[in-house]
Image (spheres, rainbow, N blue to C red):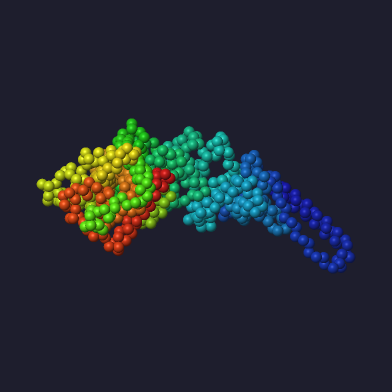
Amino acid sequence: MHSHTLSRRLSRLAGFLCLLGACMSLPGLAQTPTAPAAAPVAAKALDNATCLTCHDGKKGKLEVPGAQGKPRALHSVAPDKFGESVHAKMDCVACHTDITDNAEKGNQHAKDTAQKLKKVDCAGCHTTLWEQAQKDGSAKAKPRLGVVAENIEAYKKSFHARPNSDDKTRPNASCDNCHDTHSFKVPAKGTPQYAEFRLGISKACGENCHSDQLETYAGSVHGKEALDKKNAKAAVCSDCHSAHAVSNSSGDPFKLAVTGKCGTCHEANYKTYKATYHGQINTLGYAYTAKCYNCHGSHDILKVKDPESKVSPENRMKTCRECHNGKKGVGEAPAGYASFEPHGHVHDFGRYPQIWIAWQIMVQLLVGTFGFFWLHTALWFYREYKERRKLDAQPRVRADALPANLQGKHVRRFSPIWRVAHLTFALSLMVLTLTGIPLFYPDAPWASALMTALGGPHIAGLIHRVSAVIFAGVFFWHLFYLAWTVGRDWKNFKLFGPNSLVPNLQDGRDMLGMFKWFFGKGPRPKFDRWTYWEKFDYWAPFWGVTIIGVSGLIMWLPNVFGAFLPGWIFNVAAIFHAEEAFLAVVFLFTVHFFNNHFRPDKFPLDVVMFTGTFSIEEFKHQHAVQYQRLVDSGELEKYLVDPPSAAKLTAAKILGFTLIVIGLTLLTLVGIGFFTGG
């Protein structure tokens, strides 16, 4: 290129001397008025062939002045690779815009060093091209350009785009640090060229900047697969860190996203991780619980069976104690943690027999309970609705047919202490549901917002535990009060009598009678003080409180129980706790609400649990056996009271409707979570 430039300079010098001689031979020209200045000579556009005369790498080792006057090698471009690249149809000077061969402007390229040239603006060029394509309507024909524009926007927000800490004038990494702009081409996925392209990513990252990480990665299970075995499916840097949206690995956004990136390959393990407390909190958008890399490592991941692996049996306890270290309010991990199954699931009896059995128990319980009672509810609604229409909404008991002393009276059914206990029980259960369902359905569309509204997992957990203590407190108070009440009149108490909530043979006959009535095969049974479904409602919490309470206590105090129980107890506790809670919530807000509020005889609301009384007509219709028994014994008068005042009745309705709305709202959230996030 130097000889080419010299010949041009000699020819220009000869032309200038000839022109000077001609002027001197024509004196008259000296008297001619001064001509206007000649127009500037236009810059010559250098073609690629001219550039490659020096930059094709075939001229041996060419050097030019570099930084601080030190010589540097001239950048070389392989013509064959450039010809196959995405930029093959472009002129060099389209990117290197300030390179010309305009001697008049003083920037003849052969004399200019690269340090005087502007940095090539990859992002600006591609962004401009994409904006033009959107304006002229050619964007659809250039989808790849749109992808590049998106990558640029991601890069601008990335850690790589930030100023370098050592040199604020340049970013941490620019396009050409990762892409060889003269040979860059993204091959089609599935081709050998694409596999080669993928396998080169880790070396590009490591050799250019991250040499320590590359060395560690090379010894990992991922590195051995990618670098040694040339397995293009193995994880490379961009799979975890992304290609253009690289973020600070110590920041929450990266921590929250990286587990999902692990899950693109390890789908089954990612699914089981998300079912643990660690994964649930992570899914909700909080970064403080353990991620894949906390247990398995990051660049140094080894196979589980490798003795050096962080999750090998030899190292598992040590790994757990990196987080559960007895600091900042977190207890030190007991021995049981080492046998916890973070990826245990319910479909493999061979590997996880305890988990499988726990799941089977709960599935059978759920299917059996819902199957029976939803059928019972549907048949009851059909039969009662049909009967109500036939009666044309006539009163079921005529008030004027009652004795005069009974007309207008109410019957006391629940004392104030039981009504307060019921209300406390109901409110605490609703709060437990509200604070628990975001963890149970962390993928649900409402879960993250609800957890934020509750103040985050720590506050929600505190509220949940306080509510659990209240819930359990009411239950145990009830046992104590019941024992005290029965003990005071033990001689007259009958275990299977009409005032007892203990199931008896008559309950079985009543249930059979109800099903006959459902199908029109007999009259509706007449009931004493407690119906069989009310007894079920009473006894169900004994099972529910025990299962939910014990499992919840185990998860609340893992360091206590983990000290003497195996780690799989936490897997089993999580299953029992979640599934029993699901059973309780769905049963209460469907079957219980129907039995007491939504069936045609009760709709839209029964306020007896809030006022403590109901009309004598309702009493005679719903509990005919008890009514007749009290009449015959002359004890009915003891239970008669005046109707509640209008204000008390209004307050009871407001309270009742409020609880129903809350319950149905929670049921809706559970339904959405079950069908979309569970």
Write down the quadrant of residue 343 in the picture.
top left
Q: Residue at x 38, y 40 (%)?
A: 272
Q: Residue at x 61, y 55 (%)?
A: 118
Number of marks drawn: 0
Classify residue 536 as left or right of residue 598.
Answer: left
Q: Mark yes or no: residue 435 visible.
A: no
Q: Mark yes or no: residue 645 visible.
A: yes
> Residue 306: x and y, percent?
36, 35
> Residue 677: x and y, percent?
41, 45
Classify residue 343 as left or right of residue 419.
Answer: right
Q: Seen from this angle, which residue lies furthest top? A: 350
Q: Nearer the viewer, residue 203 or 494?
A: 494
Classify residue 200 as left or right of residue 21.
Answer: left
> Residue 290: x and y, percent?
36, 46
Q: Residue at x 30, y 55 (%)?
A: 607
Q: Seen from this angle, which residue lies furthest left? A: 491
Q: Nearer the viewer, residue 337 or 607?
A: 607
Q: Residue at x 49, y 42 (%)?
A: 202
